[in-house]
Image: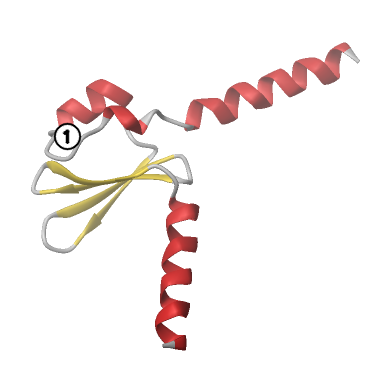
């Protein structure tokens, strides 16, 4: 039982580390301001036109354009679901 509780605590700590408080991040912040507030992203994906997607865990995104924040997506899965719903509504009209 003690081992099970230790394992559960360990998993909880691991999953909580990947979730960042993106409410601290505002449009127009520089890259260094972002990393000072919430740390380095788990991955960076360079896009065309001087745009970068900074991933925090597997469900959070900060979009950087020309070295400054242009968009914050605290829940990628919810945003995808919202976009799918909007597209379906467009198809039915």
Where 58 sits versus 24, above or below?
A: below
Horizontal side, residue 13 vs residue 70: left or right: right
Q: At x 58% / y 30%, what residue is drawn?
A: 15
Please tell me whether residue 55 is drawn above or below residue 5 in the rendered image: below
User: What is the number of callouts on the image?
Assistant: 1
List the single residue furthest toward the right.
1
Q: Mark 1 points at which residue?
A: 31
Indicate the quadrant containing the C terminus: top left, top right, bottom left or bottom right.
Answer: bottom left
Rendered position, 8 above or below 18: above
Up-down relation of residue 84 to residue 28 (above or below): below
- Left or right: where does residue 15 sit relative to residue 83? right
Residue extending furthest top?
2
Name the residue: 21% across, 35% down: 26
| Residue pictured at 40% horizontal, 82% vertical | 90
Question: Foreground: 49 or 28?
Answer: 28
Percent of width and height locating residue 48: 17, 63
User: Label 1: few (<14), some or many (≥20) within 10 Å?
Assistant: some
Residue 64 is situated, as x and y percent measured from the top left of the image, at 19, 46
Residue located at (41% from left, 66% from top): 83
In which quadrant will I find the N terminus?
top right
Q: Quadrant of residue 13?
A: top right
Q: Which of these two is toward me, 79 or 29?
A: 79
Secondary structure beneath dot 1 equals helix
Q: Relative to 90, is 70 on the left or the right?
A: left
The image position of residue 73, as x and y in percent, is 35, 47
- Is 47 on the left-hand or right-hand side of 5? left
User: What is the residue that sits farthest to the left in this orientation?
Assistant: 66
Q: Please identify the quarter of the rendering in which residue 25 is found.
A: top left
Q: Where is residue 67 in the image (x, y as percent from the top left)?
A: 10, 42
């Amino acid at each position: 039982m003690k081992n099970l509780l230790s394992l559960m605590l360990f998993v909880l700590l691991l999953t909580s580390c990947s979730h960042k408080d993106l409410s601290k991040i505002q449009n127009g912040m520089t890259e260094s301001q972002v990393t000072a507030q919430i740390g380095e992203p788990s991955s960076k994906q360079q896009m065309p036109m001087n745009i970068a997607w900074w991933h925090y865990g597997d469900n959070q995104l900060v979009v950087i354009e020309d070295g400054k924040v242009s968009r914050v997506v605290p829940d990628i899965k919810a945003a995808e679901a919202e976009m799918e719903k909007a597209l379906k509504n467009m198809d039915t009209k």
